[in-house]
Amino acid sequence: MSAHLITAEARTRRGRVRAHIYGDDYPAEQVRRPTRHVLAMFAGRAPANARGCFLNEQRTERMIRFGQMIFVPAGVGIFGSGPGGAHKMLSYQVDPDASETFRRIEGAWDERDLDRFGDIRCERLAATMRRLGQEIASPGFASDLLIEGMTATLEVDLIRHLRRHAPP
């Protein structure tokens, strides 16, 4: 049996931040095509055999190992498979029409881009995601302002990371 439980959520002008638990009683496979850009991170270590592939017009369906953090551009399909069990995750989902930051880089993602998106390794992004997770779980004074500012920072840092690690 598959389950998805949202444990905390905050909405911003550009998107939403969620803490959630995905659970499957058995190894699972799934295909999704989000309408929003999604930066997702396992709250703990990524399952050792979490893998999948991105699906778009230029993509051969070569499986890659997913890391602790992945970026899925809006409109790009993703196939994933994993070991089953409960997995805590954090995600920032950005409405492509609401974010000027993402409009600057949207376009046709090639196979090398998509492979990189399956394993985003950036401690700055991970730290911001963890802080967002803490804030939505236990909101404090001016939480809405803090979350709005952190998500703007997250967008800029993600774009910088993707540009810095772009293949030649």
Image (tube, rainbow, N blue to C red):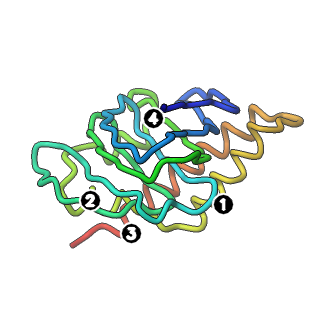
Q: Which residue bears the numbered disc 4?
A: 99
Neighbour tally class for label 2: few under 14, some 14-19, many 20 plus, Cα within 10 Å: some
Q: Which residue bears the numbered disc 2?
A: 113
Q: Is residue 3 left or right of residue 37?
A: right
Distance, label 4 to label 2, CA atoms, is: 20 Å
The amino acid at mark 3 is Arg
Neighbour tally class for label 4: few under 14, some 14-19, many 20 plus, Cα within 10 Å: some
At horizontal 63% and vertical 27% (from top left) the residue drawn is 11
137 or 98: nearer the viewer: 137
* Rendering coords of residue 157 (x, y %): 52, 57
43 is higher (above) or lower (below) than 96: below
Q: Quadrant of residue 135?
A: top right
- Please tell me whether mark 4 sits on a helix, a strand or a loop: loop
User: Label 2 near label 1: C-beta < 8 Å?
Assistant: no
Residue 161 in view: no
Q: Which residue bears the numbered disc 1?
A: 127
